[in-house]
Image (spheres, rainbow, N blue to C red):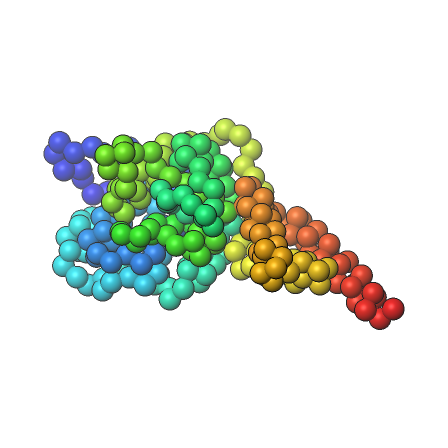
């Protein structure tokens, strides 16, 4: 263990149960432009027992500021997985959490981090959980937030409401670290990963389209609105395997009904 520098705060060592929970978290940095933020985020991760770093479209990782600010945690940077797309970055994750301070039309409802911590911490006990952090200047786009089942904001003063990327990583992870003590409520069941959710959403959308839902301008893009609502509902707690199968079964019945109607 790297000794704490004199006069600096040192987080105590977690027991094995807490360690397991924190190791189920992946930090995903999307479009980070400054290598120093990646280095600082890696150090914050290691402080909290999180070692899985995923980078989407990062800057060069051999820059001097990366090594300097990743003091004691360069192994986290060196072990990072670099992905060309966000879909690849969150593959295999049962819960994807996006961090944002922006609200607006087309963006997912945002929950205060303090309210979301219990749900996220519970999910980590049986699922791989990805926490997304966006660009320094623009954060996460609407399309990137669409990958998330949960969007959270970190409370901050109006004088400076936006946190530095690495600061945001530390605040979120330390909140989970403090909450992830052994015991507590029964964790939720394992949730299906993102790639299975994507196939389910595509099948539901096709089934609804076959029933007459449309994205035509005259229909005010009804199908798009319905799919956003369904994703928001399913995203509140995630989908377990038996629920995933049941929803596919409903789609199958719709497909059979439409096929029989077209024949007759």
Q: Is residue 202 visible?
A: no
Q: Is residue 138 above or below residue 173?
A: below
> Quarter of the image containing the N terminus?
top left
* Residue in view at x 68 percent, y 52 percent: 247
Q: Position of residue 32 (x, y in %)?
A: 28, 56
Left/right placement of residue 110 relative to residue 61 reads right
Q: Position of residue 124 (x, y in %)?
A: 47, 42
* Residue in view at x 37 percent, y 44 percent: 102
Q: Position of residue 183 (x, y in %)?
A: 49, 30
**Residue extending furthest toward the front:** 218
**Residue extending furthest toward the right:** 264
> Quarter of the image containing the C terminus?
bottom right
**Residue extending furthest toward the left:** 6
Quarter of the image holding residue 53? bottom left
Q: Is residue 77 above or below residue 122?
A: below
* Residue in view at x 21 percent, y 56 percent: 34
Left/right placement of residue 233 relative to residue 62 reads right
**Residue extending furthest toward the bottom:** 263
Quarter of the image holding residue 237? top right
* Residue in view at x 77 percent, y 58 percent: 253
Quarter of the image holding residue 260? bottom right
* Frontmost residue, 170 versus 143: 143
Q: Position of residue 104 (x, y in %)?
A: 42, 45
Q: Is residue 2 visible?
A: yes
* Frontmost residue, 262 versus 189: 262
Total number of numbered discs in the rendering: 0
């Amino acid at each position: 263990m790297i000794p704490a520098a004199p006069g600096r705060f040192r987080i105590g060592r977690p027991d094995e149960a807490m360690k397991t929970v924190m190791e189920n978290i992946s930090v995903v940095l999307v479009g980070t432009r400054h290598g120093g933020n990646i280095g600082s985020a890696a150090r914050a991760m290691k402080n909290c027992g999180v070692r899985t770093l995923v980078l989407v479209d990062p800057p060069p990782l051999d820059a001097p500021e990366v090594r300097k600010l990743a003091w004691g945690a360069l192994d986290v940077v060196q072990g990072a997985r670099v992905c060309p797309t966000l879909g690849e970055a969150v593959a295999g994750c049962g819960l994807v959490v996006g961090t944002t301070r922006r609200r607006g039309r087309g963006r997912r409802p945002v929950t205060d981090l303090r309210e979301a911590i219990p749900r996220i911490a519970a999910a980590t006990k049986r699922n791989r959980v990805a926490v997304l952090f966006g660009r320094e200047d623009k954060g996460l786009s609407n399309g990137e937030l669409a990958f998330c089942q949960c969007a959270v904001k970190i409370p901050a003063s109006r004088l400076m409401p936006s946190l530095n990327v690495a600061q945001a990583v530390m605040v979120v992870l330390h909140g989970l670290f403090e909450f992830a003590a052994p015991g507590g409520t029964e964790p939720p069941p394992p949730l299906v990963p993102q790639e299975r959710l994507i196939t389910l959403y595509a099948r539901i959308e096709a089934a609804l389209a076959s029933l007459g839902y449309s994205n035509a301008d005259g229909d005010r893009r009804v199908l798009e609105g319905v799919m956003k609502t369904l994703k928001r509902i399913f995203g509140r707690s995630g989908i377990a395997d038996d629920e995933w199968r049941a929803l596919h079964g409903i789609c199958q019945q719709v497909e059979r009904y439409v096929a029989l109607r077209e024949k007759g």
